[in-house]
Amino acid sequence: MPGQQRRGGQAGGAPAGAAGGDRRDGRGGRGGAGGPEKTAYIERVVAINRVAKVVKGGRRFSFTALVVVGDGDGQVGVGYGKAKEVPAAIAKGVEEAKKHFFRVPRIAATIPHPIQGEAAAGVVLLKPASPGTGVIAGGPVRAVLECAGIHDVLSKSLGSSNPINIVHATVAALKGLVRPEEIAAKRGLTLEQVAPAAMLRARATSGHS
């Protein structure tokens, strides 16, 4: 009985504590060093892959992480990190995403007009939606849109199902969005002649541009 109690204590204590420590290290690593940044930005891990490199002594494993970071208010970026451990790969992806931030034009909580983005074999179609619709999209597209602060939109993936291609196609679509003021300036028209009245009312109410 004493031996069983000791074995039970080791099985229930040490591995559980070790596993819990790994998860805390992974979360606390990003939150501890960049605590204020994590409260300011939204981080979404889209995909994590394990990569094996065959060398003379056997296989060496590393991990890659595709991460989307945004402030939830029109600013978003995508990063791809690679490291020997998952938390380090995610941290590298977050840093790369912050270096590639760009501004997304918005009207209220949706996009100004329909647009299609392409990247490699990925094709993503985005359409504006009325308030309350929500984000009608799959996981990779949803991560990019929510980090960018777009909460009402319709989307459809028309190409590859690879998360990396889908994310980059979504980014290409968002970068292709044009503000109504730019269209009016190119055509030599007033803003009222280019944008629908409902769009102008929504923008005046929300204050987004």
Image (cartoon, rainbow, N blue to C red):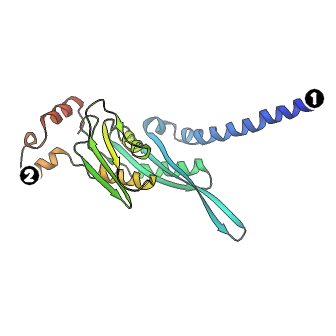
Task: Kindly give the residue lying farthest to the bottom in the view shown.
Answer: 56
Q: CA distance from mark 1 to mark 2?
A: 86 Å
Q: Which residue is mark 1?
A: 2
Instruction: Please give the name of the residue rendered at 69% of the width and 39% of the height, measured from the top-left corner.
Output: 19
Instruction: Please give the name of the residue rendered at 25% of the width and 36% of the height, measured from the top-left corner.
Output: 208
Instruction: Please give the name of the residue rendered at 11% of the width and 53% of the height, measured from the top-left corner.
Output: 186
| Above or below 122: residue 90 | above
Name which quarter of the figure residue 181 lies in: top left
| Above or below 204: residue 80 | below
User: Neighbour class for label 1 at 10 Å: few (<14), some, many (≥20)?
Assistant: few
Could you say where residue 22 lies in the image, as x and y percent from the top left? 66, 41
Name which quarter of the figure residue 1 lies in: top right
In terms of sequence position, does the residue under pointer 1 or pointer 2 come before the other?
A: 1
Secondary structure found at label 1: helix
Tag 2: amino acid: Arg
Q: Which residue is mark 2?
A: 187
